[in-house]
Image (cartoon, helix red, strand yellow):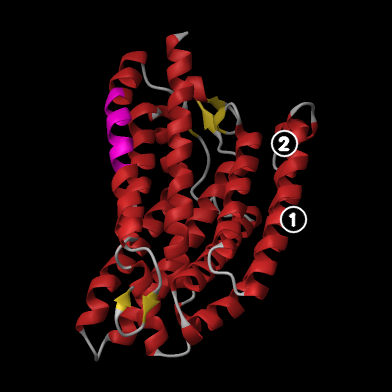
Amino acid sequence: MLGLELSFIWAGIIAFAVLVYVILDGFDLGVGILFPFAKDERERDVMMNSVAPIWDGNETWLVLGGGGLFAVFPLAYAVVMPALYAPIVAMLLALVFRGVAFEYRWRTVRWKRLWDWSFAMGSLVAALMQGIALGAIVQGIEVENRAYAGGWFDWLTPFSLLTGFAVATGYGLLGATWCNMKLEGRVQTHMRQLARPLSFATLAFLGLVSLFTPLQDAVYAERWFRWPTMVWTLAVPVLVALLALRLWRGLERGDDVAPFLCALGFFVLGFVGIGISFYPMMVPPELTIVEAAAPDESLLFTLVGTLVLVPIILTYTAYTYWVFRGKIDADEGYH
């Protein structure tokens, strides 16, 4: 009984870490995705400045999610990694190029455009690969004798490409609404203009992914449309519609904060939809949370350290955002 409870507690911690990573690192990846749409060098400078103090702290949650999966769900890790080796490696390499661009872009004039494109393409590729990996997991990973039994390119399907573009577009919306919240003047106006079409595209992708997800496995359709989970299934699109209306109204009124929070809400609700589809699976369609979990002793040992570590991470993350709150002036920085 203890092991059962610990495995579900750890599944909640991993899910929380992944969600926090998506909503925090999503907007700074979105800023990079929007880099090619900036009107000039001045816009790119202030856009990068808006995320420069916080981007590396955001990726702490990726480490926590991946490291936690390895430590407490080793079977799931052993299955997922071979299945998604190519997109995960591509994502990590893209994040490396993107991180290097943060440092080198300010130290050169001759090669500045190269680092601009490294930042933009690193952000785009990382977002696409995250979405493709998500789509590959949703469509199911073939498991036989507790090991991955699929092919090299099972992750590359029309559905995984759809989810890849959906995540990248959603991150673009997060980046636009973040810049709308943090910047001033013509840059803010430009980002607000970009946010409108990105919001329509994000909603369209959400609708398409929601339409095709139940077709990936009959179990998904059963969970979505049976009682009582059907209540949540029906509530999610209603809440998405309400958030969309508030986002558009906020953009029309020139609100700073509301559009960004509404864009974050899209991802939270999408995450809820994934939870409805997956639970109690760790790796669909066959590997459950309990089956994938490590021994009880390992779960308990790592949980003690995590209960100390996570509040520390939350505290310094909150403190960083508090210190760098407010608007950014193109000439003077934060104020």
- Expressed as whole percent of the image width and height from the top left, the position of residue 304 reads 29, 23
The kind of residue tagged 1 is Ala
Tell which residue pokes out farthest to the front in this image. Answer: 335
Up-down: is 230 above or below 273? above
Q: Residue at x 28, y 71 (%)?
A: 102
Q: Residue at x 34, y 43 (%)?
A: 314
The kind of residue tagged 2 is Trp
Up-down: is 252 above or below 237? below
Up-down: is 127 above or below 106? above
Q: Secondary structure at mark 1?
A: helix
Q: CA distance from mark 2 to mark 1?
A: 14 Å
Q: Residue at x 42, y 84 (%)?
A: 43
- What residue would you read off at disc 1? 241
Q: Secondary structure at mark 2?
A: helix
Please tell me which residue lies in front, 11 or 111.
11
- What residue would you read off at disc 2? 232
Q: Which residues are magenta?
A: 304-313
* Residue 284 visible in rendering: yes
Looking at the image, residue 205 sits to the left or right of residue 74; the answer is right
Q: Residue at x 33, y 36 (%)?
A: 310
Q: Quadrant of residue 162?
A: bottom right
